[in-house]
């Protein structure tokens, strides 16, 4: 197993803990894992998580401003938004409405 594989697995374990109807950011997951500055790696992990059989809720991970920057990796440009809206999260112009209110910070909540 490569180091990136084990990092990705750690990212997936955190992502699976994000409650339905809440969102977090790539950077918050990286910071929780003690790898501050590796938000991009968290993004890469989310991008390839769709092949993971354990159903990683990658749609709940957005950028630090609440933007759906990973939306092109869901098999359609509106799929990520639809998944969030199915959980009661409003999205306007590719941005989570009430982002601060819905934000789940693993460093504070785990």
Image: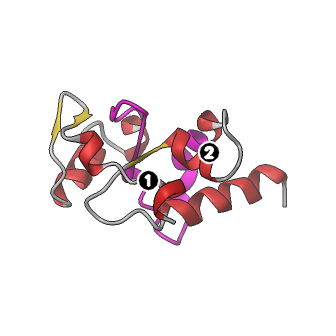
Q: CA distance from mark 1 to mark 2?
A: 17 Å
**Residue at the (30%, 56%) spot, across then down:** 22
Q: Secondary structure at mark 2?
A: helix
Judged from this view, the residue extending furthest toward the bottom is 54
Q: Is residue 22 left or right of residue 11?
A: left
Q: Please name which of the two marks, 1 or 2, marks the residue nearer to the observer.
A: 2
**Looking at the image, residue 31 lies above or below residue 58:** above
Q: Which residues are magenta?
A: 42-69
**Looking at the image, residue 105 lies above or below residue 1:** above
Q: Looking at the image, can residue 98 be seen?
A: yes
**Residue at the (70%, 48%) spot, across then down:** 34
How dense is the environment of label 1, judged by Cα within 10 Å: few (below 14), some, or many (20 and up)?
Answer: many
Judged from this view, the residue extending furthest toward the front is 108
In terms of image quadrants, where is residue 69?
Answer: top left
x, y (%) of residue 40?
60, 34
**Looking at the image, residue 95 lies above or below residue 13:** above
In terms of image quadrants, where is residue 27?
Answer: top right
In depth, the one of 68 and 18 nearer the eye is 18
Q: Is residue 2 magenta?
A: no
x, y (%) of residue 50?
49, 56
Which residue does the numbered mark 1 point to in the structure image? 58
Which residue does the numbered mark 2 point to in the structure image? 31
**Residue at the (27%, 50%) spot, across then down:** 102
In depth, the one of 74 and 109 nearer the eye is 109
In depth, the one of 15 and 108 nearer the eye is 108
Q: Secondary structure at mark 1?
A: helix
Q: Are marks 1 and 2 in contact (CB under 8 Å)?
A: no
x, y (%) of residue 96?
24, 39
Q: Is residue 19 left or right of residue 25?
A: left
**Residue at the (59%, 37%) spot, across then down:** 39
Q: Is residue 63 magenta?
A: yes
């Amino acid at each position: 197993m490569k180091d990136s594989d084990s990092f990705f697995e750690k990212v997936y374990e955190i992502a699976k803990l994000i409650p339905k109807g809440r969102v977090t950011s790539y950077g918050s997951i990286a910071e929780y894992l003690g790898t501050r500055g590796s938000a991009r790696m968290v993004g890469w992990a989310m991008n390839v998580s769709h092949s993971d059989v354990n159903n990683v809720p990658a749609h709940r991970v957005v950028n630090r401003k609440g933007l759906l920057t990973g939306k092109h990796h869901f098999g359609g440009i509106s799929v990520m938004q639809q998944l969030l809206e199915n959980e009661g999260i409003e999205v306007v112009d590719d941005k989570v409405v009430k982002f601060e209110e819905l934000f789940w910070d693993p460093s504070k909540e785990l």
